[in-house]
Image: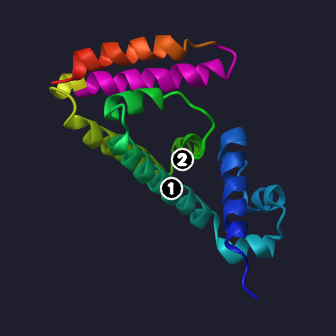
Amino acid sequence: MSRPPLARDKVLDAFEAILIGEGERAATMDATARAAGVSKGGLLYHFASKDALELAVVERLHSLVADDVAAMAASPDGPIAYFIRTSVMEDGALDRAILATSRLAQGGNAAARDALRGIREQWADALRDHTKDAAALDLVMLVSDGLYFNNALAGGSIPGPVPSGTDMDALIALVERAAKA
């Protein structure tokens, strides 16, 4: 009898949640099995090692970023507006994958570190033709970084400004005026 594919995702979701909430050291195989509500054997059926779990987190990130880049290209508002607007975390699958991968990178995982650099390049590649030059591309990327960072602060003890509504629209308009060819 084969196991349902949802069980694999449930284990991966649990591992990701532990990484985000408690860090890489706490994300053990035993803790992951407990959090997923599966036996250690059930976990090992899907992931033979912690390295396999870590690789799956990075692979999930790559898949989600590919979807995001496609959505950026298809956005009726344009890639710059899409990218800036989605730089504010909403606790979506992509946000969780970025945070989990960041935790792995902080723990010394080279594949996670390389993945984070690579996704930044994918976003830059998707935006490059919509900006007038390298400095304009840097502007868009750095505004995105600032929004993401300030949003992360807002979730902690240090409040960070995160524009929304008409304030976000005004920020996007300003960035587009400065960045577009």
Callout 1: 10 Å neighbours few (<14), some, many (20+)?
many
**Which label was assigned to residue 158?**
none
Callout 1 touching callout 2 (CB < 8 Å):
yes
Q: In this view, does 18 lie above or below 140?
A: below
- Closer to the camera, 131 or 11? 131
The image position of residue 81, as x and y in percent, is: 37, 27
In screen coordinates, is 177 left or right of 22? left
Is residue 25 in sight in this rendering? no
For disc 1, the marked residue is 58
SS of the residue under disc 1: helix
Instruction: Judge whether residue 49 can be spotted in this image.
Output: yes
* Amino acid type indicated by mark 2: Thr
Magenta-colored segment: predominant secondary structure: helix
Quarter of the image containing the N terminus?
A: bottom right
Residue 151 on image: x %, y %: 57, 22
What residue range appears in magenta? 137-158
What percent of the width, then of the height, locates residue 95?
56, 40
Given residues 55 and 63, the one toward you in this image is: 63
Quarter of the image with the C terminus is top left
User: Which percent across, then down, holds residue 13?
Assistant: 68, 54
Which residue is depicted at the point 84% across and 59% down? Answer: 34
Residue at 53% in and 61% down: 55
Q: Is mark 2 on a helix, strand or loop?
A: helix
Q: Residue at x 72, y 57 (%)?
A: 28
Instruction: Say above or below: 154 vs 94.
Output: above
- Whether 144 is among the magenta residues is yes
140 in relation to 177, above or below: below
- Characterize the local packing of mark 2: few (<14), some (14-19) or many (20 or more) Cα atoms within 10 angstroms: many
Q: Mark 2 points at which residue?
A: 101
The residue at the far front in this view is 76
